Amino acid sequence: MDSKLHDYTVFDLETTGKKIIQIGALKVRDDQTVAKFSTYVNPLEKINDYVSHLTGISNYQTDAAPLIDEVMPDFLDFVGDDTLVGHNILSFDCNVLADNGYPVANPKLDTLLLANSYKKRGLFADPIPNVRLSTLKEYYGININFHIAISDCITNNIVYQKLLDGDLAKATEIIDFTPKQVDSRLAGQRFVITGQFRQATRYELTSLIQSHGGKVTGSVSGVTDYLLKGELDHVTGKCKKAAEKGTAVIGYEDLMLLLQK
């Protein structure tokens, strides 16, 4: 497979694990995005809280969505004969499509394998712990919501074109796709993040808070409203400082509850 494509379709699925709940795709011609495809899919089953929190997709959105058999003809027409580009598509997305009755015979390029080959050869200019899409997103300074199919396609396309161009240095500037008018439900609230989380990276949590009007700072002070603490770590210096200041210490699930208010 030629890894230097200029005409292709990037795609991504959001799923319950087995059932598809969202499909996103970008059609690229001469390195430029010329068309987008995005739809929710009704999985005919309830989405559990973990998946809903991870993706931001609710049962309300999927209950009103078309079924996979209604969506796939349009998706396959959109893709045509293009090479499919995606992150981990060979091990996950294409298998999910096949399991749902839609194996795709198109040529495929998996950017996870491409990035991993660069990492193994030591070609990245700066240290990178792994080649997950979330890690590459942070490495290249891409500020966009994560685990939304069309947003992940945008991220994946930037990552692929960086790899294609041999641009393997860590970004010094942010590529910002966040909306200028943010949801203001966390407006005026200040957060500090400490520790590691199972559900998301700290970079993703920062973007999530900022996209809802909140502010993330590096240290706990008298004006900090919440210390968001990862469940994978014990008490940190920031936790002790929060106790001294009377700052509320919350976890990932607590943050999700704040966003539902």
Image: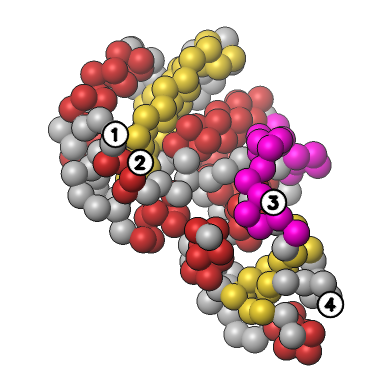
- Give the image location of residue 47, x and y in percent: 29, 53
Name the residue type under label 2. Answer: Gln
Name the residue type under label 1. Answer: Ala
Query: Residue at label 4?
Result: 222
**Disc 1 or 4, which lies upstream in sequence?**
1
Q: Determine the CA span between mark 2 and mark 3.
A: 23 Å
Instruction: Classify mark 3: helix, strand or loop.
Output: loop
**Disc 4 or 2, which lies upstream in sequence?**
2
* Residues under numbered marks 2 and 3 in contact, where contact means CB atoms less than 8 Å apart: no
Q: Nearer the viewer, residue 83 or 113?
A: 83
**Disc 2 or 3, which lies upstream in sequence?**
2
Query: Residue at label 3?
Result: 213
Q: Determine the CA span between mark 1 and mark 4.
A: 46 Å
Toward the top, the furthest residue is: 30
Is 5 situated above or below 149?
above
- Give the image location of residue 249, x and y in percent: 64, 79
Query: Residue at label 2?
Result: 61
Q: Determine the CA span between mark 3 and mark 1.
A: 29 Å
Range drawn in magenta: 167-188
Residue 187 visible in image? yes
**Disc 4 or 3, which lies upstream in sequence?**
3
Query: Residue at label 1?
Result: 65
Is 51 situated above or below 2?
below
Name the residue type under label 4. Answer: Gly
**Tag shown at residue 192:** none
Q: Is residue 48 magenta?
A: no
The N terminus lies in quadrant: top left
Q: In the rendered view, does 141 fall on the left or right side of 230? A: right
Instruction: Classify mark 2: helix, strand or loop.
Output: helix
Toward the front, the furthest residue is: 261
* Residues under numbered marks 4 and 2 in contact, where contact means CB atoms less than 8 Å apart: no
